[in-house]
Image (tube, grey):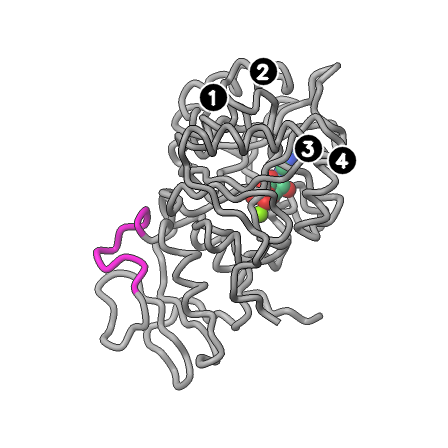
Amino acid sequence: MDVTHPQADSRILPATPDAIAEAAALIRHGRLVAFPTETVYGLGADATNDNAVAAVFAAKDRPRFNPLIVHFAETAAAAEAGDFDGRATDLARAFWPGALTLVLPRRAGCAVSLLVSAGLDTLAVRVPSHPVARSLLRAAGCPVAAPSANRAGLLSPTTAAHVAESLGGACAAIVDGGPCPVGVESTVVALGGGSAAVLRPGGVPVEDIEAVVGPLAAAEAAGERPKSPGMLERHYAPGLPLRLNAVEARPGEALLAFGPGPPGAALNLSPGGDVEEAAANLFAMIRALDRPRFQAIAVMPIPEEGLGRAINDRLRRAAVHDSS
Ligand code: AMP
Ligand code: MG
């Protein structure tokens, strides 16, 4: 059953300096704290503390083979954990702080828990740009492992209330920084062994990344085990079925429009047809329509360019039928 009310024990803190200091102390003491980033809300834990990292997997019911992204306040701190080659350095210069995650070889002696890497010899690192995330990371003074603050396989949270609805009981605190401005998860790029590949489209458009490092390989080779479990077929899923590339609502459907939509649309991702606005609205609007009074959510086509690629990636995975 859906839990639609915040749990009594979730403490939502305002993003004041005192509350951020308190949240940072909780992280240092091995507790879990949800916090805003420019992409989505993360469920943060001290990445050097095995027990805290294990608690993240447990709270999300996340498969142990799905590694976590580690967040740093500064590029220099990330470079102590991951091995930056020339392209990684160029990408960090161009897009950090920001919505880009780099998957790099782990450095020898790296202090980050091995659990974070889920058995791989690589580490996913990011320096986020959200001012609350940056203040929290600075105050915590440790690398912070933070996957999206939702149960595994379900929609990512873009407000503190979304976190409270699904994971409230698991967090010592939720820092409320308002709605996330980008609204889709980070772009994940793997570097190493002479190749660069996009493992997940996200908040930094692939076109912008290719302008810095040249053409990127696509990650999904046929028959290969997913390199990035964000590539799992079904993910980001609401309770209701999704119908994609819809031009109008069928009986019982809620129409999620894009652009100057037909009359009768339940909600519109961006009446002006702006993919960035649509990304920022995506998860909150799907959640708002994921109600028993509808039988399905019909989504209008989104152009496959810029953040549209990340939106379409999420929609395709959300639309995969659950056969379990
Ligand atoms: P989330 O934090 O829930 O948005 O998910 C993080 C994404 O990064 C998932 O798709 C992970 O599989 C991916 N990821 C994290 N670390 C690695 C890694 N070492 N290698 C490949 N993918 C990774
Ligand atoms: Mg996630």
Q: Amino acid at mark 4?
A: Asn
Q: CA distance from mark 1 to mark 3?
A: 28 Å
Q: Which residue is mark 2?
A: 79
**Which is more N-terminal, label 2 or label 3?**
3
**Which is more N-terminal, label 4 or label 3?**
3
Q: Locate the N terminus by quadrant.
A: bottom right
Of 172 and 261, nearer the camera is 172
**Which is more N-terminal, label 4 or label 2?**
4
User: Mark 1 falls on what kind of element?
Assistant: helix
Quadrant hosting ligand 1: top right
User: Mark 3 falls on what kind of element?
Assistant: loop
Q: Amino acid at mark 1?
A: Ala
Q: Residue at x 46, y 71 (%)?
A: 243
Q: Nearer the viewer, mark 3 or mark 4?
A: 3
- Residue 219 seen in this snapshot: no
Residue 80 drawn in magenta: no
Q: Amino acid at mark 2?
A: Ala
- Note whether 88 is above or below 232 in the view shown: above
User: Mark 4 falls on what kind of element?
Assistant: helix
The region drawn magenta spans: 268-277
Q: Which residue is mark 1?
A: 92
Q: Residues within 10 Å of mark 3 (few under 14, many from 20)?
A: many
Q: Would residue 121 be found to the left or right of residue 269 on screen? A: right
Mark number for residue 30?
3
| Residue 242, image x, y percentages | 48, 69
Q: Nearer the viewer, mark 3 or mark 2?
A: 3
User: Can you tell me whether the CB of the residue at mark 4 lies under 8 Å from the nearest atom of ligand 1?
Assistant: no
**Which is more N-terminal, label 4 or label 1?**
4
| Residue 299, image x, y percentages | 39, 67
**Which is more N-terminal, label 3 or label 1?**
3
Q: Which residue is mark 4?
A: 51
Q: Nearer the viewer, mark 2 or mark 4?
A: 4
